[in-house]
Image (tube, coloured by chain):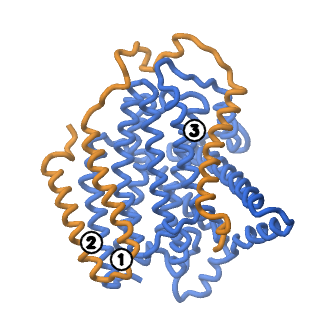
Chain colours: A orange, B blue
Amino acid sequence: MELLCHIGNGVLSITAMITGLALVFAALLIAKLISPRSYSVKKAEAYECGIPTRGASMLQFKAGYYIFAILFLLFDVEVVFLYPWSVVMKDMGPSGILCIGIFMFVLIMGLAYAWRKGALKWE
Amino acid sequence: MFDFGKWTSCFNDWLLGTGMADWLAVLIECVIVGVIVLLAYTVLALFYILYERKLCAWFQCRLGPMRVGPWGLLQVFADMFKILIKELICLKGTDRFLFKLAPYLVITSSVIMLACLPWGNGLQIIDWNIGIFFVLAVSSVGVLGILLAGWASNNKYTLIGAMRSGAQMISYEVSLGLAIMTIIVLSGTMNINELVWAQEDAWFLFKGHIPAIIAFLIYIVAATAETNRGPFDLPEAEHELTAGYHTEYSGIHFGFFYLAEYLNLFIVSGIASLMFLGGWMPLHIPGWDGFNMVMDYIPSVVWFLGKAFFISFVIIWFKWTFPRVRIDQLLSFEWKYLMPFALANLLLMTVFVALGWHF
């Protein structure tokens, strides 16, 4: 139960992070040492099925995804707000339903509005 | 059950007993933790590559890799070595910094998530009191890596693949979070260790009965989409987008995305087994003391890995059974069906908990 608690979670999280960075770094280093290297103009072109690339590729993109990103922001913040409530729900009892009912009502109205407006429709 | 925490505390006492400074002991322990995580990561990745290839072959009435080693067991090592000796190509016009940063983000987020999972009784590294919330937060960093990879590659296929992947992963994250929250309402804690111990008498799937089972189904669907696996593998739809966001990556650069994908499969299965199937907790049935005693003799690591591999099997099974969906079907499925259902299910669970209709 008391595993590694003398080290502290912050230090352990940073250890895991450094481990991940070290894994990528070490593997890249090994690959650089043993892999061949050559350069040619043709090889450095983007792969688009053998057809020469037309125009820039880092361009502005279809707004269809943009609306979903905004919806996601809305609902992710909502999930963040719901988490603290979910931990104490068991102790609150029936009053917990009322509290979250009002919050959920506003939220579901928002979703219904977005739905009616056609934000969920893919065009 | 054997408590692996005894080993670590024993080791810690021995280390401090040799008379070294505290910070040095902590440093040595951190290095050991890092090496263990690294080993677990690589071994799991190698295992999963073989697992997927073999299962895929069996679903299609083939034998799978058979030539290298007995039953093709050494095939993965050959593959990994091959991928290491391939040339790393950095294309003209790519954003070099972001192009090289992307694998770091993807791998690091999955390593941190792996370190949060409880492998057995006392076999857990990071144990925040907000445990499961921390895992969800770290998992969203992986999306950034994928978006960066697609954007920096200077290729239209990768850009479309990354945008699809981003839209898909952020959408399904909402219902994933709601399904996990359903169980937190039931348990009243977010600490991973406490979540496992709360399932000592019965797993949450049985404790919460109807809403927990619905949440489990929602979780499995959302997790399949979250790991970009079929039938939701749109970002890698090879007939439209060549290989999606990692088209331009070669050699081990591509290997990182490959590894992270398999590790994410293990991590979502691990979280499913933790939240719904008791983590490393053996199957206990209240009142059946003899049965519970027998179940306790099976080591906790075997329980955890067994459950995780079973759920991975189900997700791989989905991939080789269902045809791929379209992007509009995918997004409308999430926003019009899965997410409202998850919200309604959360309210249902709230009512059950408030009225005490759970075990």
The residue identified by callout 2 is: A100
Where is residue A10? Give x, y as percent.
Answer: 59, 59
Asked if one can make out residue B302 in the rendered structure from this viewpoint, the answer is no
Quarter of the picture holding the C terminus of chain A: top left
Where is residue B32? Give x, y as percent.
Answer: 73, 56
A72 versus A62 height, above or below: below
Query: Which chain contains the residue that carries disc 2?
Result: A
Identity, as a three-letter code, of the amino acid under mark 3? Phe
Say how many tags the image has: 3
Query: Which chain contains the residue that carries disc 1?
Result: A
Question: Which residue is painted at 45% across and 29% down in the image?
Answer: B152
Element class at badge 2: helix
Identity, as a three-letter code, of the amino acid under mark 1? Met
Question: Which residue is painted at 15% across and 54% down in the image?
Answer: A113
Question: Which residue is painted at 49% across and 58% down in the image?
Answer: B135
Tell whether B219 sits left or right of B108.
left
Quarter of the picture holding the N terminus of chain A: bottom right
Closer to us: B259 or A112: A112
Instruction: Kindly identify which numbered label has been placed on residue A89.
Output: 1
Seen as rendered, the residue at the extreme right is B18
- Asked if the residue at tag 2 contacts the one at tag 1, i.e. Cβ–Cβ closer than 8 Å, the answer is yes
Seen as rendered, the residue at the extreme top is A41
Element class at badge 3: helix
The residue identified by callout 3 is: B256
Q: Residues within 10 Å of mark 3 (few under 14, many from 20)?
A: many
Question: Which residue is painted at 53% across and 55% down in the image?
Answer: B267
Where is residue A16? Give x, y as percent.
Answer: 62, 52
Identity, as a three-letter code, of the amino acid under mark 2? Ile
Based on the displayed image, in which of its 4 quarters is residue B176 positioned?
bottom left
